[in-house]
Amino acid sequence: MSENRAESLDDHRIRTLRGPKNQVDPFRPYHYLVEQERSLAGIVEDVLSIFLTNRECRYSCLMCDLWKNTTDTPVPPGAIPTQIQWALEKLPGAKQVKLYNSANFFDPGAVPPEDYPRIASLVDQFETVIVENHPLLTGQRCLQFARLLRPRLQVAMGLETINPEVLRRLNKKMVPGDFSRSVSFLKKEGIQTRAFILLRPPFQSEEEGIHWAKQSLKFAFECGTDCCTLIPTRSGNGIMELLHQEGLFTPPLLSSLEEVQEFGLGLHAGSVFVDTWDLQLFSQCDTCFDGRLQRLVKMNLEQRILPPVSCSCCS
Ligand SMILES: [Zn+2]
């Protein structure tokens, strides 16, 4: 039953199970923050993240909850630069800025190309500008924007998993080859890339989740990706809760995240970051959670494997 049901998941079904969107203003980012990240040059630096209010992504990926802070219709030309300017006036100086738009930066229906010059001039003082984009939207617009930028461009793309069947079921409408072609195209143009990799997406056991996250990290680096961000899969968008009830999705264990991060760092192929947001969700033990979290954060910043946390309660 579950198999067939999972196979029939489509855009319509994913969308019908959603809750309401949040109220957003097309002229204000819905969130912004400063975090620390180790640069590719090996220096721990402040990175600004501006979460731009934008039109909902054209893809309806199974695991995505970014639609919650999006508009139904395109934002007018000028809205995105206005949001960036507003956030930069509130944030401290930094060398890197992430302009995340809950969709694809190079989708002309998301960020109007006529806004590129003003965006480029607003981020002129940074060294690196990071945007997110779907591999299938890699193309001339990336080059058009990169040429306007003084800072280096980095494009973050969801690879998610290289398990072909699971990737198909995630409804992302791409295959791993689309990702590798994108990385090659961008790399040839001097544009850096970052891969988002899911730990234990739906339809995987804990062991399969670990195995495929490791294989996906390896694949991303073999493609030439500069850095990977490992994301433990969370529910919270409607369909994921249903899959959980049906036994088709279980969030990964914190210990699996530790194992895959260690594996990734051991490859010495590029930076490996773990998404440490709300990790308590994946913890099985209150006694050692803080220690484990601090270790993961430190491994993100130092990019080396640190001694494991031992715990009398759960070891
Ligand atoms: Zn413990």
Image (cartoon, helix red, strand yellow):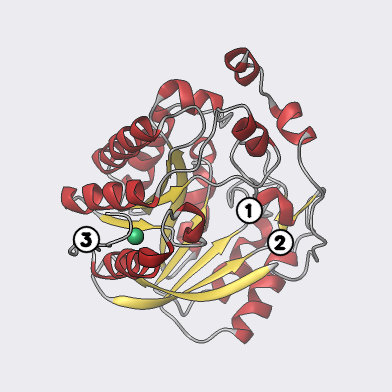
Instruction: Report the side of 304 relative to 249 (left or right).
Output: left
Q: Nearer the viewer, mark 3 or mark 1?
A: 3
Residue 53: numbered disc = 2
| 85 is higher (above) or lower (below) than 295 | below
Name the N-terminal-most of marks 3 and 1: 1
Instruction: Report the side of 266 relative to 198 (left or right).
Output: left
Tell me, yes or no, if residue 60 can be seen here: no
Q: Which residue is mark 1?
A: 102
Label 1 sits on a secondary structure element that is: loop
Which residue shows up at 41% across the image and 39% down it?
A: 182
Q: Tell me whether the residue at label 3 lies in contact with that at label 2, contact meaning CB atoms closer than 8 angstroms.
A: no
Q: Tell me whether the residue at label 2 lies in contact with that at label 1, contact meaning CB atoms closer than 8 angstroms.
A: yes
Which image quadrant for residue 297? bottom left
| Mark pair 3, 2: CA separation | 40 Å
Which residue shows up at 57% across the image and 84% down it?
A: 91
* Few, some or many residues within 10 Å of mark 2 (<14, 14–19, 20+): many
Q: Which residue is mark 3?
A: 308
Name the N-terminal-most of marks 2 and 1: 2
Label 2 sits on a secondary structure element that is: loop
Which image quadrant for residue 309? bottom left
Which residue shows up at 46% across the image and 58% down it?
A: 146
**Residue 110 in picture, x, y percent from top left:** 68, 50
Q: Nearer the viewer, residue 242 or 196?
A: 242
Q: Amino acid at mark 2?
A: Thr
**Residue 93 in picture, x, y percent from top left:** 48, 85
